[in-house]
Image (cartoon, grey):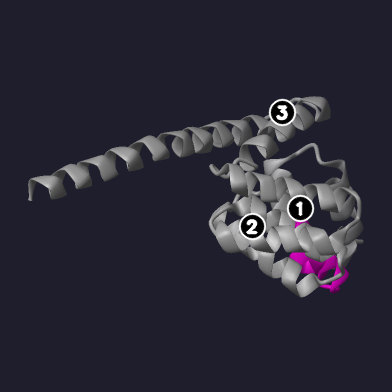
Amino acid sequence: MRKYKSAVAAFLLALAVMQGPVQAQQASASELLDQLAEAEDARAADRLERQLRQEWSKSGSAAMDLLLKRGQDALDVDNIDAALEHLRALTDHAPDFAEGWHTLALAYYRADQFGPAADALERTLALNPLHFGALRGMGAIFEQVDKPHLAYDAYSRVLTLRPHDSDVIDALERLERQVIGETI
């Protein structure tokens, strides 16, 4: 019984040590999101977004971070098949890593596979409801499949998180007539 108590205590201590960095990362991301929503200008917003994406790219595992990097590198050189291979492996091995799903969605989108891209974005948003990149991706997919009301809603949500996104502002203006209608 004594050995059992020691093993349980060691497990709980290890779990607490592992959760510390995860909780710190979540706090940092939350602070960055708050600052991003209040950014004074596009330059400040871009800086905060880079920091936030860096936080979101930390899985807690060097192996998973490497798969993410390889998938991103493959996307950078338009090797979609290699990107999909790395990113599917990543999401298989780290199903709770939102950024893995988001990057997989980008790869599917680039392959014109909108259904799988939307599924991956839904997983991203289930894990991180404030992932403005995933919301923006949903808006783009809804535009592609001629669902302007849903696209408008997704883009509107992005703008509350990231108010200086000129592409999203343009998309909202483009969709406004279709969604809201013209007034006299």
Kindly identify the amino acid type of the residue bearing the numbered disc 1.
Gly
- The image position of residue 69, as x and y in percent, is 73, 45
- Residue 54 in the magenta stretch? The answer is no
* Element carrying mark 1: helix
Residue picked out by circle 3: 39
Q: Is most of the magenta stretch helix, strand or loop?
A: helix
* Element carrying mark 2: helix
- The single residue placed furthest to the front in the displayed view is 3
Vertical arrangement, residue 24 with respect to residue 111, above or below? above
- Residue 144 in the magenta stretch? The answer is yes
Question: In the displayed structure, does residue 176 sit left or right of residue 1?
Answer: right
Residue picked out by circle 2: 90
Kindly identify the amino acid type of the residue bearing the numbered disc 3.
Ala
Q: Residue at x 62, y 60 (%)?
A: 91
Q: Out of 81 and 128, give the one closest to the viewer.
A: 81
Vertical arrangement, residue 21 with respect to residue 74, above or below? above
The magenta segment: 137-155
Mark 1 neighbour class, 10 Å CA radius: few under 14, some 14 to 19, many 20 or more: many
* Element carrying mark 3: loop
Vertical arrangement, residue 78 with respect to residue 34, above or below? below
Q: Quadrant of the C terminus?
A: bottom right
- The single residue placed furthest to the left in the displayed view is 1
Q: Which mark's residue is nearer the viewer, 1 or 3?
A: 1
Cβ–Cβ under 8 Å for marks 2 and 3: no
Residue picked out by circle 1: 71
Q: Out of 58 and 134, give the one closest to the viewer.
A: 58
